[in-house]
Amino acid sequence: MINKFTNIKIPKYKLDYSIEKNKNIVQGSLTKNIKLPFSCRSGVCGTCKAKIIQGNVHANNKINHVLTESDINNNIILMCQAEPVSDLLELEIISPMPRQIQSGKPREIISEILSVKQITPEVIDISISVSKRFYFNLNQLSYMEILIPGLEIKEKYYISNFDKKNNQSNDGVINILVIKSKNLDVNEYLNKNLIAGEVITLKGPYADNNFPNFLTKPTLLLTNHTNIIKTLIIVNQLLSSGCNFPIMLISYFNDKKDIFLMEEMHKLQFLYKNFSYKITLQNQDGSNTSRFLLGSISKVINKIFPDLSSHYIYINGDESFLIEIRKKIIELEAKEENIYTDLYN
Ligand code: FES
């Protein structure tokens, strides 16, 4: 199996982390919250010069206005124009390391709404511009509050940025998926009252992940429709952090018309051969297909797994969902120490 990741080592700064091979070194490192020296990101300023000690890169020498012939002969590259090729890449950074990205001390940020789009009756996608000055870490699993005077909203709004290659805030735009609140018709309120051009206050980001981010066993994630956003974001993170073990997502919807983010699941399955997904439908006529299974998760899971003793299991849902699913997976030999539950409340 071809390794899609490169292990980057920068001994002088005791850095040792992995990035995807299809990203340049500056960009890939940012996705790991490591800010290397850079400025223009266009091959013009030379701030991102580094010497290769070990390994190979694919360097875009067409966009290189600063490397001399002697630099090139000495294995100096521009990290903003070089994608790793080898599984290991050891570098010596030439400029000093900059101040690192702050990881998520919540703060209030005045921002402008770019668009509000209803995805399903239950979910809306709000695109918001964020000043590039706020150079903080926006992991996909972090969430923000939307502060609107006179409206108290106690829900979490997950940062999605599903279709953005670079999910850092420095691209100036974040996408937040808002799901209908159980207690208040927040979704409807936001959809009607937030319009492009309006200025609102965001508070955050907050971190929300106690699930191990490096997996050493096959993993099964189980969720119902209200929690698909968060669960899919976890899947996304696991896959992009280089987990090679099989990961399966099983989600539960009432009906085919309620399904959302299926395109995202499909895209992930296409990108990562170790990922697969199944959707179970409660109220659906028609035949069982390999993608859609009829009945709740607890009814169909034993058709897929006779034994879950060697799996990590992540369950995300409300209390009754957690109780029902936990009971079922214990029947299928899942081990208590490998079960992570995430209560939606
Ligand atoms: S950041 Fe300016 S050349 Fe790479």
Image (tube, rainbow, N blue to C red):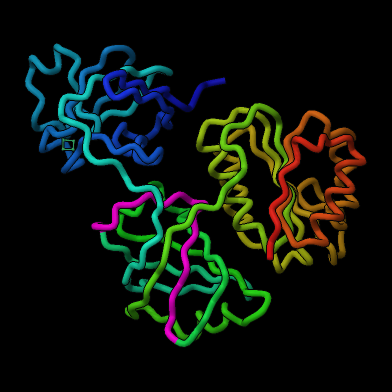
Q: Which residue is at 70% across, 40% downward?
A: 248
Please determine whether, in this image, residue 153 is positioned above or below residue 243. Answer: below
> In the figure, residue 312 lies in which quadrant?
top right
Q: Which residue is at 57% across, 70% downward?
A: 155
Residue 120 visible in the snapshot: no
- Point out residue 64 in the picture as x, y percentages from the top left corner: 14, 31
- The N terminus: image quadrant: top right
Magenta run includes residue 128: no
- Point out residue 20 in the picture as x, y percentages from the top left corner: 43, 32
Q: Which residue is at 36% across, 36% downward?
A: 28
Q: How many marks?
A: 0
Ligand 1 placement by image quarter: top left
Q: Which residues are magenta?
A: 132-149
Could you tell whether 108 is left or right of 244 in the image?
Answer: left
For the residue pair 312 and 46, the one nearer the viewer reads as: 312
Magenta run includes residue 133: yes
- The C terminus: image quadrant: bottom right
